[in-house]
């Protein structure tokens, strides 16, 4: 069993206990335990075998026993018993935004509601509004939440689909007879969520049947939707649909381009073709007389239209075609352009790894610096730091920095934005730090005006460096609060505030669709992993894909600055406050 699976089970136990009405202390212990397990650098099986597991901070003896049982048997009786005490649908209901365990328990006990469908019906029949603690506003919110999850239920997070697709692609490429194979569709375009995995391959016609048999048997699918010589579809073990299409190798570039999409980009390209008396389809690019224009790869296809190669991330018909025709495509940021990482948590607040472990991991990634930003005091559930503990952390950072000659830790905070737009730490506390990330974590239900005013006011504090996860959205789970982007970007520009692209694949916030608008206001972006463990640092690379999708170049991104430049940048902000 993998660490992440075990962590998920512990998390679920915490949730089930809360559903049961157990004391919060007990439920918190499981949630914490899950986080600790996720962040462990050692092998879990080794820790269990040596008995060291019970000595790890945050894992008491009860948790150690359960982890041991899971590692040794792959099962946990306690968990199975606990789970069987509730109807299945009850856990499903937790997916509805705003439905916490307390609410679910109340609806279960008072109305016998055990599924999302039943919940929807009860809301429509106005049976929820009258229950104590609910009201008609909550009832409407629940209905909106159900509509939201219905709309998103057939989509998957980018990183989860990416991992599945990568494995599938490797398997397909390993099959004899396969000449070329690529992932296409929204995954290749780096959309934040995807519906399915689209793969195209080329092979001689006599090899195709064998490849399809291989695809539908050797990838451990849950089920086979269809199997043909040119197209087959499966449901992967993890429940995603994956399509494989196979063509002759000389048709490969056209099908690759077609299934990469987007539909809008394809439609625009077909319009261009028509203007030139050509016909473009997934099978090729043809002259009026039916003759095919031979293209060895996608670059050849674009050059037929006097266009530079358009990176897949840009293919949304949002100006990329015009830019490619006039040689104005941006030189997109690459992973190698990054010089450091900002916005990381440690065991001081809700991170799973120590300051030193985070720094070492970041340095090993080849970065020049790490900006630590643990939570501020109001975020009690995340063990937010008091001004005193923040000061102590500063001492530890200084001591660590003395040890390094080739790496630097910057001391920051993820300071909460209060309801009225003031900040959780006073100015004299903020003045002691290298940089300040500000974020909203409480009372996320706001109108556009409330949200915009609150954040604009917070950005006016002269100590602020970066606005963190600007909308608070959680992909496929909750929509962020609405913002007036013109006002937000104007204020960021005026106050020299950088805006975060939160690179956690659960957030990707700011959304890529607004990045170009931010740039127009002269706002810099920072690609931040919001890492809560050493593993989480690598989330920064998902963020690079999103930045590319938003047309960003290296110079648009704060953390492409080398350590000297960013230190100057931070000092510049501090100088302006004194
Ligand atoms: P998804 O799956 O919703 O995350 O997004 P895509 O873009 O992967 O969409 P999908 O899988 O339905 O189709 C893959 C590509 O195939 C799409 O990006 C463009 C192309 N395609 C599909 N349907 C059409 C169509 O009706 N017209 C044109 N021109 N292209 C299409
Ligand atoms: Ca797709
Ligand atoms: Zn945050």
Image (cartoon, helix red, strand yellow):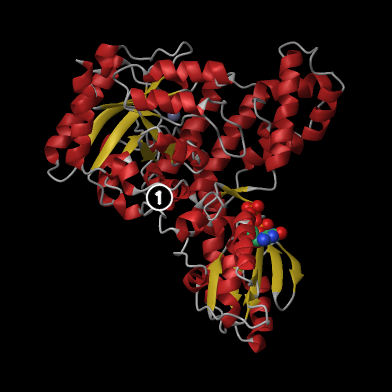
Where does label 1 land, which residue? 541
Location of residue 212 by image quarter: bottom right
Q: Residue 38 lies in what quarter of the image? A: top left
Helix, strand or loop at disc 1? helix
How many numbered marks does the figure carry?
A: 1
> Residue 379: image x %, image y %?
44, 20
Q: Residue at x 48, y 49 (%)?
A: 549
Residue lying furthest bottom: 206
Residue 42: where, in percent of width, then height? Answer: 36, 49
Q: Nearer the viewer, residue 140 or 60?
A: 140
For the point 61% across and 32% down, the residue is 478
Report x, y in % for residue 475: 57, 39
Is residue 234 or residue 337 the one in the foreground? 337
- The image position of residue 519, as x and y in percent, is 40, 38
Residues packed near mark 1 inside 10 Å, few (<14), some (14 to 19) or many (20 plus): many
> Is 340 located above or below residue 328 in the figure?
above
Report the residue at 27% width, 18% height from top.
Answer: 430
Instruction: Locate residue 283 relative to residue 37 in the image: left or right.
Output: right
Horizontal relation, residue 168 to residue 357: left or right: right
Residue 350 lies, with reference to residue 419, above or below; the image says below
Q: Is mark 1 within 8 Å of ligand 3?
A: no
Q: Is residue 197 visible?
A: no
Among all residues in the image, which is located at the extreme right?
125
* Quadrant of the image containing the C terminus: top left
Could one spot residue 503 in this view of the protein?
yes
Depth check, front residue: 575 or 81: 575
């Amino acid at each position: 069993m993998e660490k992440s699976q075990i962590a998920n089970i512990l998390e679920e136990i915490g949730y089930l206990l809360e559903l049961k009405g157990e004391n919060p202390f007990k439920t918190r212990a499981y949630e914490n335990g899950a986080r600790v397990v996720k962040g462990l650098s050692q092998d879990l099986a080794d820790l269990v075998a040596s008995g060291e597991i019970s000595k790890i901070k945050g894992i008491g003896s009860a948790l150690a026993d359960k982890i041991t049982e899971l590692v040794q048997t792959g099962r946990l009786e306690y968990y199975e018993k606990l789970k069987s005490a509730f109807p299945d649908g009850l856990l499903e209901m937790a997916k509805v935004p705003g439905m916490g365990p307390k609410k679910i328990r109340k609806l279960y006990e008072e109305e016998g509601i055990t599924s999302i469908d039943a919940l929807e019906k009860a809301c429509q029949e106005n049976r929820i509004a009258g229950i104590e603690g609910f009201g008609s506003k909550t009832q409407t919110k629940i209905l909106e939440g159900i509509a939201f999850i219905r709309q998103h239920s057939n989509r998957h997070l980018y990183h989860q689909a990416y991992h599945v697709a990568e494995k599938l692609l490797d398997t397909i490429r390993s099959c004899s007879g396969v000449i070329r194979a690529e992932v296409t569709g929204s995954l290749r375009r780096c959309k934040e969520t995807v519906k399915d995995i689209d793969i195209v391959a080329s092979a001689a016609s006599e090899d195709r049947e064998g490849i399809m048999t291989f695809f539908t048997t050797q990838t451990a699918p849950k089920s086979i939707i269809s199997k043909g010589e040119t197209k087959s579809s499966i449901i992967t073990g993890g429940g995603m649909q994956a399509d494989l299409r196979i063509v002759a190798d000389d048709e490969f570039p056209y099908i690759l381009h077609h299934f990469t999409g987007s539909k809008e980009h394809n439609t625009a390209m077909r319009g261009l073709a028509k203007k030139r008396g050509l016909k473009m389809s997934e099978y090729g690019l043809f002259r009026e007389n039916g003759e095919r224009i031979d293209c060895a790869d996608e670059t050849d296809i674009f050059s037929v239209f006097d266009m530079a190669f358009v990176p897949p991330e840009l293919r949304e018909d949002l100006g990329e075609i015009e830019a490619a025709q006039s040689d104005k495509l941006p030189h997109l940021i690459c992973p190698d352009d990054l010089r450091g990482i900002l916005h990381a948590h440690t065991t001081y607040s809700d991170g799973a790894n120590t300051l030193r472990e985070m720094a070492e991991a970041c340095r090993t990634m080849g970065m020049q610096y790490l900006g630590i930003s643990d939570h501020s005091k109001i975020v009690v559930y995340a063990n937010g730091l008091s001004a005193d503990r923040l000061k102590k952390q500063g001492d530890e950072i200084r001591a660590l920095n003395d040890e390094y000659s080739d790496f630097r830790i910057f001391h920051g905070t993820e300071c909460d934005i209060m309801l009225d737009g003031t900040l959780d730490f006073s100015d004299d506390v903020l003045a002691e730090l290298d940089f300040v990330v500000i974020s909203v974590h409480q009372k996320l239900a706001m109108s556009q005006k409330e949200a915009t005013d609150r954040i604009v006011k917070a950005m006016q504090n002269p100590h602020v460096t970066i606005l963190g996860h600007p909308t608070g959205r959680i992909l496929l789970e909750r929509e962020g609060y609405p913002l007036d982007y013109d006002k937000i970007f104007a204020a960021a520009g005026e106050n020299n505030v950088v805006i975060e692209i939160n690179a956690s694949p659960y957030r990707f916030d700011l959304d890529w669709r607004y990045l170009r608008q931010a740039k127009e206001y002269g706002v810099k972006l920072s690609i931040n992993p919001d890492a809560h463990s050493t593993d989480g640092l690598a989330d920064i690379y998902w963020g690079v894909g999103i930045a590319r999708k938003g047309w960003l170049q290296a110079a648009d991104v704060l953390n492409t600055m080398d350590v000297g430049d960013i230190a100057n940048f931070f000092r510049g902000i501090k100088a302006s406050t004194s």
